Image: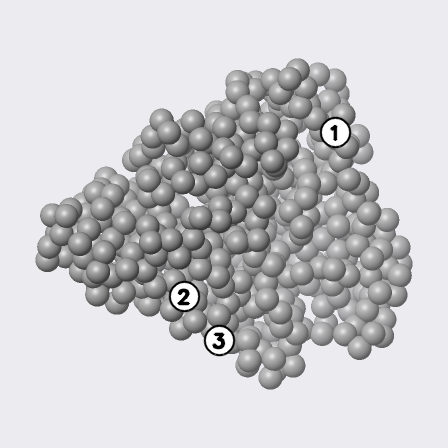
Amino acid sequence: MSQIRPILGLVLAGSLVLGACAGGDAGSGSAAADDGAAKEIDRDGTFRYIFVQNPSTLDPHRSANAWDMIFFSLAYDQLIWRNAEGDLEPMLATEWEFVDDGAAFELTLREDVTFIDGEPFNAEAVRANLERAMTLPESAHRGSLARVESVEAVEEYTARINLNGPGANLPDLLSSTVGSMISPAALESPDLDQNPVGSGMAKLVEYIPGQVNRWERNEDYWEPEAAQAKTYEIYAQTASPTRVNMLSTGQGELAYLMPQDQDPASAAGLNVAPSLSSNIFSMSFNLDKPPFDDIRVRQAAEHAIDRQALIDGVFFGAGKPVAQSLPPDHWAYHPEVTPDNDDYGYNPDRARELLAEAGYPDGADFEFLIPSLDDHRSLAEAMVPMLEEVGLRASTRVIESPTTGVTFFSRKEGNAVVGLSAPVVDPTNQYQRNLPGQFANPWENTSEAFTAAWNASVEGTSRDDRLPGIHTMIEEDKKLLNSFPIMLFTPPSAWSDNVVLPDGYEPAYAPHFRGVGVAAD
């Protein structure tokens, strides 16, 4: 059995220990204030998070929106937990290993977990969930699970996933939306999209689309101290200045902000720090329509963008320029695929040459879709004149952010869209969009070379084994250019003094709330 580092718990000043996930020892209720004094946690309190949008759905298998995971982390447990450092730790699975020379993946499961409808969690539940994710016509994850041949309940608490090829990314995948476990009795429920039935630390009690969703602590949860608040409320507010006002007037405890609102937040007495983030802004193309059906036009768009100018001028330095879908500090980062490389960097003259070669000497018009979020809108609005300078004239259309994936990839509206990637799960998950049959590749633009490189990237059992294949995969992605990365985005998070955070907890762009609470009066 692979040696998996157990969760040690998160130690708070004042000697409170809260389990970040499975196995944490939760002691009494005190935590440190910024001045070093201990704060008592109000176990009957309400923690309010102010986000920018609703969930697109509360059915994990239908979710194509990475930010739904904020809500899923309340309603559902995942098979495996990914900590802030990106390491995998036990959650519903206590141990896991590849067996039969990598032909299968086995998980040993917790034996003390019950879904909120009373159904037991066991290997049959794992089988039912993964089979639904693989076969549901509306599943956003069928492509992710293409390497899964079948799933078996070997014993009551042992699940076996049989593979039809190498699958080194599977453990990471099961720490994401794909690994969120739904009660088997609810898999056919017609209202699962708004009535989640999981084994998570909280239960949904009210959902007002466009305004707020409210959750109450699951008192029967297998890790009693995970939910340090009795009630959780997540408000939808797209305007960053309004989020600052809500925090400063006591209408919320935590939010992320636009970088230009960091100083006003600090002046209002809020705590401010860069968000933990591996999220990357990109521009994606509709290859079914001119002009971006020609790769030279897509290359021209990449050369038109001055990444550093966007970071400095729009986001006040809160980010780093990238030409690949991994942040610069990631273990698999390709050191040669950077904005400093002449093939990928800012070069308006080269962009004009490419447009002329593609048959657009006078430029081309296109529709640019923009999700209705302040950061997306600010970025896209700054990109428009850069694109126009080289001859790519954009007409913009703002669309609802939670359904961006459906609008662009399913309905194929618009010619291009700006979007923000999910937090990095595994390098292959950031790039699998280029494989055939993927939700984000309805145009089926791929290559044998990319597929071979992607396959090589999931072979082996160590990072060193995988690195050559991953780097080749990143290089082949640039030859397809279904999209191009622009920047790693690290916006500030802000929180009030009413918040009690576990020691070492860094508010993330896509946060979880395990161990987070509010102070008692």
Residue closer to the observer: 279 or 464:
464
Q: Answer with the quarter of the image where residue 42 lies.
A: bottom right
Residue closer to the observer: 98 or 443:
98
Judged from the image, the secondary structure of the residue bearing numbered disc 1 is loop
Q: Amino acid at mark 3?
A: Gln
The residue that disc 2 covers is 308
Cβ atoms under marks 1 and 2 closer than 8 Å: no
Query: Is residue 417 found left or right of 457 in the rendered image?
Result: left
Cβ atoms under marks 2 and 3 closer than 8 Å: no
Residue at mark 1 to residue at mark 3: CA–CA distance: 46 Å
- Residue at 52% across / 47% down in the picture? 333
- Residue at 19% across / 51% down in the picture? 354
- Return the disc, 1 or 3, that comes first in the chain's sequence: 1
Q: Is residue 209 visible to the viewer in this orientation of the structure?
A: no
Residue 172 location (% of width, % of height):
61, 37
The residue that disc 1 covers is 2
Cβ atoms under marks 1 and 3 closer than 8 Å: no
- Return the disc, 2 or 3, that comes first in the chain's sequence: 3
Residue 432 location (% of width, % of height):
45, 36
Query: Is residue 61 found left or right of 230 in the rendered image?
Result: left
Query: Is residue 110 found left or right of 293 in the rendered image?
Result: right
The residue that disc 3 covers is 260
Q: Is residue 296 visible to the viewer in this orientation of the structure?
A: yes
Residue mark closest to the camera, 2 vs 3? 2
CA neighbours of label 3 inside 10 A, class few (<14), some (14 to 19), many (20+): some
- Return the disc, 1 or 2, that comes first in the chain's sequence: 1
Residue mark closest to the camera, 1 vs 3? 1
Judged from the image, the secondary structure of the residue bearing numbered disc 2 is helix
